[in-house]
Amino acid sequence: MTSVRPRARWALHPAITAVLLLGLAGLGAWLPQLFLLAAVAGAAAGFANSGST
Amino acid sequence: MGFVAAVLGAIPQALVPGPVRWAVFGVAALAVLLRECGMLRFRVPENARLVPEDVQHLREWGALQFGFEMGTGMRTYSPSALPHLVLVAVVLVVPFPAAFATATGFAAGRLAMPVLSNAWSADGGWTEVWSRTQRWVRPLLALTVVGALGAVMLNA
């Protein structure tokens, strides 16, 4: 009998990515770090297009 | 595309006064935010064609062409107006060097979906999760984009 170890799929949930990006945007605004803010804006926009593929 | 927008953006950013550019971007950001929250409806330009699977088998560089068209969204549907808002921001308010960070971030965001989907399961289950949660994930992403670009504008 083989035991299948359940994967921690919660980390792959789209909401986790969205919350992570919001946190990074907050960090970028707090530092403030222009390039981080610009990169996070691009990443969130790219991720929002996920339904297109 | 990001490079072209950044180069083109150098012209209005040099010629148009800051407050005018900020106002135009602000109106666009508000409209897109309301659209992503489902409170406003309008169409955005999109090349509404899926990339044919046989593109990657066309020639020696077919796989590269497939990746380019898929990754940049040059030939696919656009369910969100956030990429369009980012493009407007690159032209109007994002400083030239930071535009490259925006483009890199966009590519990473596009890459995240297939990576997460493949890691989730082989049966497309992640897409179903996305469909169920996009009702509130999309406004969250819109808030992130508008907030981050607003902070870029204020700190530039």
Image (spheres, rainbow, N blue to C red):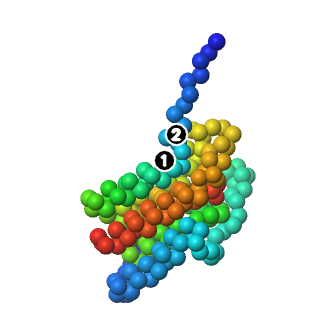
Badge 2: chain ID = A
Determine whether B124 is above or below A51 in the image.
above
Image height of B83 relative to B64, above or below: below
Q: Residue at x 44, y 73 (%)?
A: B89
- Identified at 64% across, 70% down, the residue is B46
Identity of the amino acid at label 2?
Trp
- Pick the residue in front: A2 or B76: A2
Quadrant of the snapshot with the C terminus of chain B: bottom left
Q: Are marks 1 and 2 on the same chain?
A: yes
B66 or B58, which is in the foreground?
A: B66
Q: State the count of labels.
A: 2
Q: What chain does mark 1 sit on?
A: A
* Amino acid type at image mark 1: Ile
Q: Is residue B39 left or right of residue B30?
A: right
- As measured in the structure, the alpha-carbon distance from the residue carrying label 1 to the one carrying label 2 is 8 Å
SS for callout 2: helix
Are dots 1 and 2 in contact, CB under 8 Å? yes
Question: Which residue, given by chain and number where applicable, does mark 2 sit on?
Answer: A10
Is any atom of residue B63 visible in this view?
A: no
Label 1 neighbourhood size at 10 Å, few (<14), some (14-19), many (20+)?
few
Q: Residue furthest top?
A: A1
* Residue in the foreground of this view, choosing between B24 and B12: B24
Q: Residue at x 38, y 54 (%)?
A: A23
Q: Position of residue B88 (x, y in %)?
A: 48, 75
Residue B51 numbered tag? none
The picture places residue A44, in percent across and down from the top left corner, at 48, 59
Q: Quadrant of residue B120?
A: top right
Q: Secondary structure at mark 1?
A: helix
**Viewed as shown, does residue A37 lie left or right of B27?**
left
Which of the labelled discs sits on residue A16, or is there none? 1
